[in-house]
Image: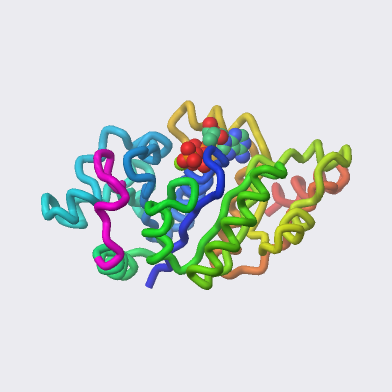
């Protein structure tokens, strides 16, 4: 039975879609049967991020209205055969989906996949609440600025009250040079300041945007820091105890680790 992970945020534009698409590719690279669901109803973008814009013929809304089967609505990725995309509905509204319908669909989906990732719309609206009802775990994606972190803490508290689910924190676009010059706190300190469990940190890196322009995800970008961070998050989602990255490592230590990796 695959676990359903929802990716949400208090604020928009923090990287939910980029992170969930990257993780989906990371799981698929590990040979896991992976489904990624674009639950940003009316504003889908995962098809573009995954380079699959010409392949989506049906959406979840078509499936609910019996215009297609669930299998027909799940589109296989051209490069990773164990990765499938299911989009919510470009012309649908979050109110068109009932919790009962979604629970039924997700109980079927769980049987066929090892992991299901749901990219939610920003904020606490109906689109997010629909997905909260079917998620086993929730990761809130945030950027490390005070405005976003306050929204994230508020969102986490609201979720905890409503769903008794403790969301994890993914810090995205973390500026490692600001940590080095002391103008930003460590990821662990930031997470503990807002009472959240840290799932991982992804550095801010121009390669993420360059990859996006080529229809590639952050799992396929040219930054080793980003791909390693993403891989560690994927492992933690699988329950593995992976230490957090030490961004204050000396250049010699970094060189040594790279050298040792090359020997394996
Ligand atoms: N780690 C990163 N480093 C650099 N750029 C990033 C990083 N993560 C995301 N971005 C960029 O941030 C922008 C917004 O990302 P994305 O669309 O994934 O956010 P979102 O939270 O899904 O937005 P929305 O709330 O509108 O759905 C994109 O241009 C993406 O390339
Ligand atoms: Mg998005």
- Residue 222 seen in the current view: no
Quick one: quadrant of the N terminus?
Answer: bottom left
Would you say 222 lies left or right of 105 here? right
Q: Position of residue 122 (x, y in %)?
A: 48, 46
Q: Position of residue 242 (x, y in %)?
A: 68, 63
| In-front residue for pair 60/234 | 60
Q: Is residue 214 above or below residue 92?
A: above
Would you say 90 lies left or right of 262 here? left
Residue 185 forms part of the magenta stretch: no
Q: Which residue shows up at 66% across the image and 68% down it? A: 241
Q: Which residue shows up at 46% across the image and 58% down it? A: 6
**Residue 232, image quadrant:** bottom right
Would you say 167 lies left or right of 39 here? right
Name the outermost residue toward the left. Answer: 67
Count how many numbered circles sit on residues in the image. Answer: 0
Q: Is residue 5 above or below residue 16?
A: below
Q: Position of residue 33 (x, y in %)?
A: 38, 60
Would you say 84 lies left or right of 232 here? left
Q: Which residue shows up at 67% across the image and 60% down it? A: 198
- Residue 44 seen in the current view: yes
Q: Is residue 132 above or below residue 184?
A: below
Residue 92 forms part of the magenta stretch: yes
| In-front residue for pair 74/100 | 100
Q: Which residue shows up at 30% across the image and 70% down it? A: 107
| In-front residue for pair 263/13 | 13
Quick one: quadrant of the C terminus?
Answer: bottom right
The colour scheme applied to this rendered structure is rainbow
Q: Position of residue 180 (x, y in %)?
A: 86, 40
Q: Magenta stretch: give its range.
A: 87-100
């Amino acid at each position: 039975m695959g676990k359903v992970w929802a990716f949400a945020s208090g604020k928009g534009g923090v990287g939910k879609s980029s992170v969930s698409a990257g993780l989906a590719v990371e799981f698929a690279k590990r040979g896991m049967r992976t489904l990624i669901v674009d639950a940003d109803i009316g504003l889908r973008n995962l098809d573009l991020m995954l380079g699959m814009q010409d392949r989506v013929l049906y959406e979840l809304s078509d499936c609910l209205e019996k215009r297609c089967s669930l299998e027909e609505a799940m589109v296989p990725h051209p490069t990773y055969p164990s990765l499938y995309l299911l989009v919510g509905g470009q012309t649908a509204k979050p109110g068109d989906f009932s919790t009962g319908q979604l629970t039924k669909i997700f109980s079927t989906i769980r049987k066929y996949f090892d992991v299901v990732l749901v990219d939610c719309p920003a904020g606490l609206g109906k689109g997010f609440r629909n997905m909260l009802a079917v998620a086993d775990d929730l990761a809130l994606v945030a950027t490390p600025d005070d405005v976003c972190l306050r929204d994230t803490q508020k969102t986490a508290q609201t979720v905890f009250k409503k769903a008794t689910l403790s969301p994890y924190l993914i810090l995205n676009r973390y500026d490692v040079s600001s940590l080095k010059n002391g103008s930003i706190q460590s990821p662990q300190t930031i997470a503990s300041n807002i009472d959240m469990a840290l799932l991982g940190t992804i550095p801010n890196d121009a390669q993420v945007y360059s990859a996006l322009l080529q229809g590639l995800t952050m799992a396929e970008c040219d930054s080793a820091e980003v791909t390693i961070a993403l891989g560690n998050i994927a492992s933690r989602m699988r329950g593995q105890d992976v230490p957090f990255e030490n961004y204050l490592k000396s250049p010699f230590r970094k060189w040594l680790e790279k050298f040792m990796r090359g020997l394996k």
